[in-house]
């Protein structure tokens, strides 16, 4: 059983799919692990550390992939990589399939079984495999750090002989994993924090962290959560009421962090150009949804924009990748926890149970076809 870890090639991806710790664990399950040279350098992991853990270094992606039974990735293989994937292999990573149906079809044609880790069901058994939570947690933390860096003023209230420094006001829009970590981080740094979300269950969570909750709490709000714990898309009427409530609030904030995403849909627009114009010079907006179109109308992917009225809008891509060592460590553990379930520990070989709920939820392609119900009809 051979596990291949080619270097990431898409964008400026800094994360890596295995760490020396998980290499040792895979070897303990009977696997040979081949890591492309330099794959971990951006995450602070040297080739010698992989070698010391028992991995075999490959001089190229092709060499790493040769004869692989399992291919571990952070991002979905690029079109240029798909041709090099061994037929019949399991390819496991963050596949980002929405809006990329052609790429999913290409994986099917390559006759690999592609698994989308972001589709892992939110059940107790799969918590240790939840890449969305592990990476969003870090993104929420980093958003506050990035916002504070751009803000250029202190966050906590300080009483000094030279005068009092007022505490910064931070508003978190969207209280999922990223939002909750942003609240906790901002509170630890001494800011006055408010937060909003369309899901009623989040109110108690927000208040338990010492922040104030802000939302239009009508009948639609009470029904605004899916069985899986995700936010539902709200009606235009509700969005208008919520926008009216938040508009006056945003004008008074120093830092606004937006984290609102709905799986498979463009990010909802929460901050209009008019709202940005109402903010004070020196205020900061950090848009964590910029890769899906952004929650802020003026956000630009990969850029920090300064508006005419002096508001900075931070649109960093791959925010978890701005903490590559930590994000790789957690992501690699997520991957190991899932892949471990695909291996017969006694026989030390692949033994995928295709009826397992985790496999059914995450498998996009198999036997040359797109099989995931969300994409099969579109392919």
Image (tube, grey):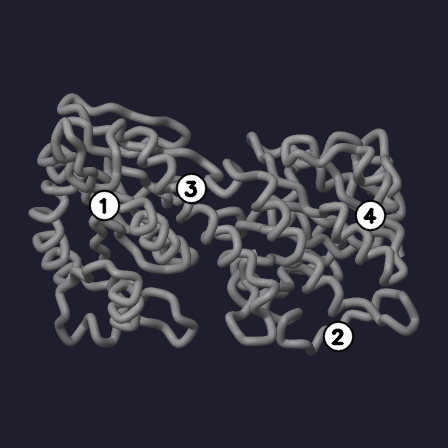
Residue that carries the numbered disc 4 in the rendered image: 86
Question: Disc 2, disc 1: CB below 8 Å?
Answer: no
Separation of marks 3 and 1 at Cα, in angstroms: 14 Å
Q: Earlier in the sequence, mark 4 or mark 1?
A: 4
- The quarter of the picture where residue 88 lies is bottom right
Q: Examine the rendering and report whether any part of residue 88 can be seen.
A: no
Residue at 23%, 63% (x, y): give it: 234
Residue 147: horizontal and vertical position, in percent? 32, 36
Q: Nearer the viewer, residue 356 or 348?
A: 348
Residue at 19%, 60% (x, y): give it: 212
Separation of marks 4 and 2 at Cα, in angstroms: 21 Å
Residue 343: horizontal and vertical position, in percent? 81, 67
Question: Disc 4, disc 3: CB below 8 Å?
Answer: no
Of the two numbered discs 4 and 3 in the rendering, the one whose residue sits closer to the viewer: 3
Residue that carries the numbered disc 1 in the rendered image: 170
Residue that carries the numbered disc 2 in the rendered image: 353
Residue that carries the numbered disc 3 in the rendered image: 142
Separation of marks 4 and 3 at Cα, in angstroms: 37 Å
* 355 with respect to 101 (left or right): right
Q: Residue furthest top?
A: 308
Q: Earlier in the sequence, mark 4 or mark 2?
A: 4
């Amino acid at each position: 059983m051979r596990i291949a870890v080619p270097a990431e090639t898409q964008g400026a991806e800094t994360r890596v799919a295995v760490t020396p710790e998980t290499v040792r664990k895979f070897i303990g399950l009977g696997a040979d692990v081949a890591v492309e040279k330099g794959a971990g350098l951006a995450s602070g992991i040297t080739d010698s550390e992989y070698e010391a853990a028992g991995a075999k270094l490959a001089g190229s992606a092709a060499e790493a992939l040769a004869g692989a039974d399992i291919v571990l990735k952070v991002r979905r293989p690029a079109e240029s990589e798909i041709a090099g994937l061994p037929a019949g292999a399991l390819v496991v990573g963050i596949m980002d399939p929405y809006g990329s149906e052609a790429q999913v079809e290409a994986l099917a044609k390559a006759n690999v079984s592609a698994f989308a880790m972001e589709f892992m069901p939110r059940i107790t058994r799969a918590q240790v495999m939840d890449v969305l939570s592990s990476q969003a947690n870090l993104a929420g933390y980093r958003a506050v750090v990035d916002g504070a860096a751009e803000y250029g003023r202190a966050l906590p209230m300080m009483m000094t002989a030279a005068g009092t420094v007022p505490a910064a006001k931070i508003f978190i829009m969207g209280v999922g994993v990223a939002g909750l970590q942003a609240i906790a981080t901002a509170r630890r740094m001494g800011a006055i924090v408010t937060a909003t979300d369309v899901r009623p269950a989040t109110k108690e969570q927000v208040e338990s962290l010492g922040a104030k909750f802000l939302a239009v709490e009508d009948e639609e709000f009470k029904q605004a959560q899916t069985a899986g714990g995700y936010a539902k898309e709200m009606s235009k009427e509700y969005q208008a009421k919520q926008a009216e409530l938040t508009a006056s609030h945003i004008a008074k904030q120093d830092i606004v962090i937006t984290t609102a995403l709905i799986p498979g849909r463009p990010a909802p627009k929460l901050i209009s150009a008019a709202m940005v114009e109402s903010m004070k010079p020196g205020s900061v907006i950090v848009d964590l949804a910029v890769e899906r179109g952004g929650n802020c109308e003026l956000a630009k992917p990969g850029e920090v924009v300064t508006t005419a009225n002096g508001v900075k809008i931070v649109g960093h891509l791959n925010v978890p990748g701005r903490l590559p060592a930590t994000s790789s460590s957690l992501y690699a553990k997520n991957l190991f926890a899932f892949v471990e379930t695909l291996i017969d520990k006694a026989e030390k070989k692949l033994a995928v149970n295709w009826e397992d709920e985790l496999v059914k939820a995450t498998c996009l392609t198999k036997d040359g076809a797109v099989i995931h119900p969300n994409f099969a009809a579109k392919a």
